Each structure stands twice: as C-alpha cells, then as structure tokens.
Amino acid sequence: DIQMTQSPSTLSASVGDRITITCRASQSISSWLAWYQQKPGKAPKLLIYKASTLESGVPSRFSGSGSGTEFTLTISSLQPDDFATYYCQQYNSYSRTFGQGTKVEI
Amino acid sequence: EAQLVESGGGLVQPGGSLRLSCVASGFTFGNYAMYWVRQAPGRGLEYISGISNNGGNRYYVDSVKGRFTISRDNSKRTLYLQMDSLRAEDMAIYYCARDRDNNGYYSGPFAYWGQGALVTVSS
C-alpha cells in the first residue's frame, strides 16, 4: 500500500501568516492527491484535488502544488476560520490512504 | 446539493454486529462510487471500504476484510456497511462519502461526506 506522510504534525501560527504543509507519498502518485480540512466534530471538507485544483467555493488563499511523491498545501494569509486539521489523501490506488493529519493551531 | 445521512450507529459488545446505512439525496446515486471512512477517537481518517456504482467492484482495507461487507441499493439510494465480529479497535465515527467523479468507478477524491455515525464497541 502507498503510505502518506505529512509534516509537521502540529503547526502553530497567527492570523495573517503564510503556512505550508507537506505531504510525501511512499511511491509516485502522479497528481492524484487531495487535501481536506476538518474542524472538531465535523466531517472533512474537500479543498483541493488533482494536487492543485481548487474545489468550488474554496477561498483562493488555499493553494496546492506538487507531483510524483512530494506535495504542499499553502494558505497564503491564515484566517480565523482556517484553524483546523488538514489531511492529504492519495487516490492513485484502490487503497486511497490518508496522511496522519496536520493540526493548525493558534 | 448532495446530501448524505448516516444511521445505525450505537453501542455493541465485542464480537457483535451492526449495520450502518447512508441515505443519499440531491444527486443521481447510481452514477457514483461510494465509500466508508472511519475516525477513531482523537485519531486520523482511515479509508476502509469502497463500492462501484453498480456494486460490481468492492474494496476493503485489510483490517476489516472478512468482517465488514459494503453494499448498496440504488433503488433506495442507500449505502450499507454490515459490520460483524466487531472489536474494540473498530470503535470510531463512520462516515459515508461520495466520489467527486460521476463515472461510477473509483476515480476521484471524496467530494461529499455525511455527518458520521458513532460506533462504540464495549462490554
């Protein structure tokens, strides 16, 4: 199975900061990578798919990049609503594994 | 707007069984692959099972293979997860989710999610 590793596990930041979360795949997944945001007690929300395509309705301060085995999620100017946990997921293979998550906290 | 509503969660003893349901609305259910994802308390997301639009292809993660069965009834717009031989480590919130792409097969990310159903395994 393809393993997905996110870093960091926790990120402390302030409103207005630019932050970057990294996701590495154990083997090439081309651009078949998605990013999700999850807030406490809520279901995950799809933010980005195909590594860099913004889902409809997602603010443009979110962006994704990468291909192959290394990917990043960037939030250009952190807003209060962005404090949450972020997960990457590969959908190159049937196993569709998630990363372990990155908690963005104040 | 697509909507997914899970039901069937609850408390079950180790070794017991439970069946989760997920009713879909707002889209043509029979056009999409569907999935189950779980999240243990305080832990991350784990994809455990998927089914193609016509039920002809099913996937299970190793940890539930042989114990869980995914199925769907397109006439009822409902996805199911039959969980047998439940263990303490199966305790989690179980989410159903819909593929983003409408080609019927496992192709896209998970675009829509239900609110989750809590399964507690304890004696």
Image (cartoon, coloured by chain):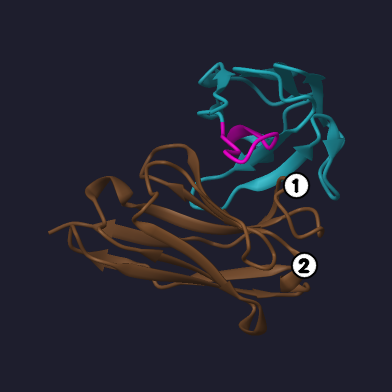
Check if residue B15 falls in the magenta segment: no
State the residue position of label 1: B107
Q: Determine the secondary structure under disc 1.
A: loop
In the rendered image, residue A85, in percent from the top left (x then y), is placed at 56, 35
Cα separation between marks 1 and 2 = 12 Å
Amino acid under disc 2: Asn
Q: Main secondary structure of the magenta part?
A: loop
Q: In the rendering, which numbered label is found on residue B31?
A: 2
Q: Is residue A70 visible?
A: yes
Q: Secondary structure at mark 2?
A: helix
Chain to which the residue tagged by mark 2 belongs: B
Q: Position of residue B36 (x, y in %)?
A: 53, 55
Q: Colour of chain A?
A: cyan
What is the magenta range?
A84-98
- A53 above or below B84? above
The quarter holding residue B117 reads bottom left
Q: Residue at 63% across / 63% down in the picture?
A: B56
**Earlier residue among tags 1 and 2:** 2
**Which amino acid type corresponds to the residue marked 1 in the rendered image?**
Ser
Q: On the picture, is A30 further left or further right than B81?
A: right
